Amino acid sequence: MLDSLGPGELDHWLAFYRLEPFGDEWLQAGAICATIANSNPYAKRTTAAQPADFIPRLLPEREQTPAEMASILDGVLRSVGITPTWASVPLSELA
């Protein structure tokens, strides 16, 4: 696109963006996702989906415990048909 966009046209778009920012990309993506979700006639929602439902929120990070890590890995492995070798050990003992 930059090959076909001349310097003058680029300056015009930059000036336009300063006056009218194109918007938040997450909000735009959320609006698209909400539209698709609300158009699903088989959805079992009691309320309409909102764009905010699809925008990730920054949560404070915390350390996962070894048991949480093992539980996640266990689920991933089982989802592809692999039984972990630690399956006979309770996850609480892995911590």
Image: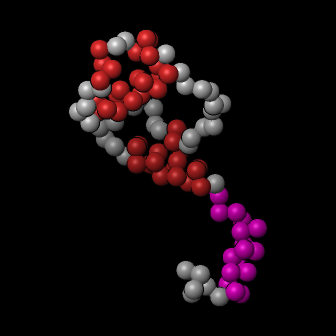
Vertical comparison of 76 with 33: above or below: above
Number of dots carrying numbers: 0
Vertical comparison of 57 with 89: above or below: below
- The x, y position of residue 23, in whole percent, is 65, 58
User: Is residue 24 at all visible to an observer of this figure?
Assistant: yes
Vertical comparison of 88 with 64: above or below: above
Asked whether 56 falls inside the magenta stretch, the response is no
User: Is residue 50 at all visible to an observer of this figure?
Assistant: no
Q: Farthest left residue?
A: 81
In the displayed structure image, the side of residue 42 where residue 24 appears, left or right: right
- Camera-side residue of 82 and 7: 82
In terms of secondary structure, what is the magenta stretch mainly?
A: helix
Figure colour scheme = secondary structure
- The x, y position of residue 17, in whole percent, is 71, 68
User: On the rendered image, what quadrant is the N terminus found in?
Assistant: bottom right
In percent of the image, x 52 and y 52: which residue is there?
A: 29
In the displayed structure image, the side of residue 14 where residue 4 appears, left or right: left
- Camera-side residue of 17 and 1: 1
In percent of the image, x 75 and y 74: which residue is there?
A: 15
Vertical comparison of 37 with 77: above or below: below
Asked where in the image residue 74 lies, by quadrant, the reply is top left
- The x, y position of residue 83, in whole percent, is 26, 26
Asked whether 9 falls inside the magenta stretch, the response is yes
Magenta extent:
7-23
